[in-house]
Amino acid sequence: MANSFTTNPISIDTTFTNGYRVNATSLFAAGNPMGLGIFKVIWRAPLASASFSIQETSDSMVLLSGTTPALFAGQDVEYDFEGMNIVWRNFKVPTLSAGLLLIYGRLQ
């Protein structure tokens, strides 16, 4: 499977550091400052001792990260941001050791 940047949810199974906007060019016109309003992230099927990090591309500020303990039983991990008005302008995923990230959002 490969990363899918133009679907909802966005599916990330491999790391990338060049930024979401570069990979989702069909959604963003050149110079358009719009971002992605995030309402849910699901980390599907992470393994024991796994980790991920989602960061802002411009300054590497951590937007969301997660780890699983060594004895992790294997259920999906859900981060719910509904009603919180979280907007990511341009993110990267430099760390994803296991599993699949499903990022649910809407253009803002």
Image: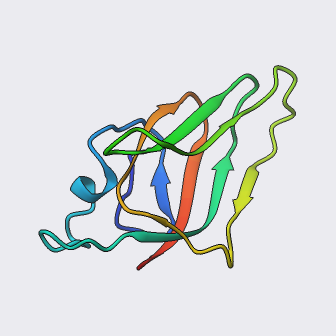
Image quadrant of residue 99?
Answer: top right
Image quadrant of residue 86?
Answer: bottom right
Q: Nearer the viewer, residue 27 or 13?
A: 27
Tell me: 91 left or right of 37: left
**Residue at the (81%, 26%) spot, across then down:** 69
**Residue at the (54%, 37%) spot, across then down:** 53
Q: Nearer the viewer, residue 94 or 48?
A: 94
**Quadrant position of the N terminus in the picture:** top left
Say above or below: 101 vs 98. below
Residue 40 location (% of width, % of height): 64, 65
Tell me: 5 left or right of 39: left
Residue 74 location (% of width, % of height): 80, 37
Residue at the left extreme, as displayed: 30
Q: How is the image coloured?
A: rainbow
Number of dots carrying numbers? 0
Q: Nearer the viewer, residue 2 or 61?
A: 61
Residue 55 location (% of width, % of height): 46, 43
Say above or below: 12 vs 16. below
**Residue at the (51%, 66%) spot, across then down:** 9
